């Protein structure tokens, strides 16, 4: 899955297990990629803007919403 800035993404169930955001973010939230910042242990870290707050999530915690036209 290739994700770039400006793409719409949706959070996956895995985000509900992140202790730092356990009460703030759940699965199924839609956001936009604002940055592709760094790599951590060979995994890309994405800045995702959701409801006015930026969350930094790994690729396996988000899913790209694709147009089905």
Image: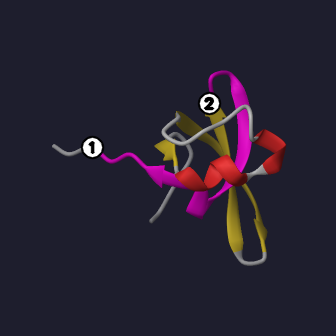
Q: Position of residue 57 (x, y in %)?
A: 69, 52
Mark nearest the camera among 2 and 1 is 2
Residue farthest along the right direction in this orientation: 20
Residue depicted at x 60% and y 56%:
14
Separation (CA) of disc 2 from disc 1: 19 Å
Regarding residue 17, the answer to whether it shows in the image is yes
Name the disc covering residue 67, or none: 1
Looking at marks 2 and 1 on the same chain, the residue that comes earlier in the sequence is marked by: 2
Where residue 23 sits, quadrant-wise, is: top right
- Label 1: few (<14), some (14–19) or many (≥20) C-alpha neighbours in 10 Å: few
- Label 2: few (<14), some (14–19) or many (≥20) C-alpha neighbours in 10 Å: some
Query: What element does badge 1 sit on?
Result: loop
Image quadrant holding the N terminus, namely bottom left
Q: Which residue is mark 2?
A: 50
Q: Would residue 45 be counted in the magenta stretch?
A: no
Q: Would residue 59 be counted in the magenta stretch?
A: yes
Regarding residue 46, the answer to whether it shows in the image is no
| The magenta segment | 50-66
Image quadrant holding the C terminus, namely top left
């Amino acid at each position: 899955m290739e994700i770039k800035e400006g793409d719409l993404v949706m959070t996956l169930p895995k985000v509900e297990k992140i202790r730092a955001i356990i009460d703030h973010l759940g699965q199924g939230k839609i956001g936009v990629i604002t940055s592709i910042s760094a790599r951590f242990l060979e995994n890309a870290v994405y800045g995702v803007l959701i409801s006015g707050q930026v969350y930094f999530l790994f690729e396996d915690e988000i899913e790209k919403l694709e147009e089905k036209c």
